[in-house]
Amino acid sequence: MENRNYSEITPEITKLAHLSEDSCLIDPELFTQYDVKRGLRDINGKGVLAGLTHISDVRATEIVNGVTLPAHGRLFYRGYEVQDLVKGFTEEGRFGFEEITYLLMFGNLPNQKQLADFEAILVGYRTLPTSFVRDIIMKAPSRDMMNTLARSVLTLYSYDEKADDTSIPNVLRQCLQLISLFPMLSIYGYQAYSHYHDGNSLFIHAPRPELSTAENILHILRPDSSYTPLEAKILDVALVLHMEHGGGNNSTFTTHVITSSLTDTYSTMAAALASLKGPRHGGANIKVIQMFDDMMEHVADWENEEEVSAYLRKLLNKEAFDNSGLIYGVGHAIYSKSDPRAVVFKQFVEDLSKEKGLVKEFELYSLVERLAPEVITEQRPIYKGVSINVDFYSGFVYKMLDLPVELYTPIFAIARIVGWSAHRIEELTNNGKIIRPAYKPIEPEQEYVSIDERF
């Protein structure tokens, strides 16, 4: 048999793909006729109620005189508003990732001893199996770090003698180990890719037990292991803001779905990673950065509101950047007036832009933040307000931190695995049924035709 390129799409496959696509097309009017909640959301974008959770709450409306109206977004972790949590640990001079991980996993804020004991547990788990980096991460490095991360997670199953044990103590142990290891798996995977594909020097720094998760990320990633206090602080805040966002986001819902089948923790987290890898979910901040790079190239005066607005209109009219018709980082499935994560983030972003000498870039972001909703409102009918989301500034932060683009989504995963872990334990604790929504069949019955009589 003739050898072919493994990735080649042959004319035969193209022809079959057209047949497959044609056989799958569904008349859009049928979704309305049968009242199908596409994307598990109603026509107003509100999610279909599929479960209950203690872990977090996302609010974007308020009731005034019996009428539900859009409101500034609010995000709660275990009943605590995120703004208050971030203000608390930053003003008290602490890193927050470990503390808020404790909150999400166990339901209450730790005291000093509880936090110290918990941090010691995480440090103890921050060790990969012997030769794992050499035998797994260094072999066949992928150009996509989310692929590398998922593969590493699935491989860890082979090192766990209790991999299939779904008792709560064992699942908690597995989750805390993965929370501790995600930074190493992500960054070591990138180092291998950078060396083998880009020819850069290969270096592997071991994590340091006295450093926080955010500090260790910068220490492991950078050749000289150096970072400023502000850099570590803002990365820590970024991790906290991305840790959790309600049970209905795609990757967390995936966690619930997979967990309900009683499969193992490694398979569950790999599935969640696969969801987060999608550009509609975890990869949006990369698009924001690319869009702004294009904007800065094509807009001569970054302070000219007319020029910037004209570029934004071109984006909406599919005449600029990737011709998708989208202004990336603007708009959200739930939030309309504001995304609380973006509100919290912005105050730190401005400080970092000053430290990095990128104030003009920050001012352009601020201008787009103000103009984009106006341009969208004048160009398109929308059922609710529109504002920037957390992705709008997170990509800019990662760029200022000199994080490689390949690690933008893994950084999201390093944070979000905390939420996934809490939701996995919640799903197992409540011992619900396997999640199985309904799909209405619309294909008419067919009579079998002998193969000699088919056309």
Image: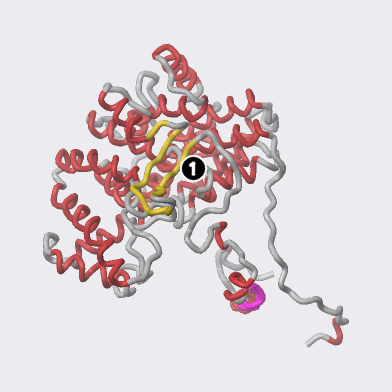
Q: Which residue is mark 1?
A: 246
Q: Residue furthest front?
A: 65
| Residue 129: percent from left, percent from top | 55, 27
Element carrying mark 1:
loop
| Range drawn in magenta | 18-24
Compared to 23, does 138 lie above or below? above
13 lies above or below 287: below
Q: Where 425 sits versus 362, above or below?
A: above
**157 left or right of 105?**
right
Residue 19 within the segment the image draws in magenta: yes
Residue located 32% across and 36% down the image: 235
Q: Report the amino acid beneath label 1.
A: Gly
Mark 1 burial class by Cα count in 10 Å: few <14, some 14-19, many 20+: many
Task: Give the percent coordinates (x, y) of residue 238.
Answer: 34, 38
Residue 81 found in image quarter? top left
Q: Is 309 left or right of 385, judged from the image as shown?
A: left
Would residue 429 be seen by someone viewing this image from the given angle? yes
Label total for image: 1
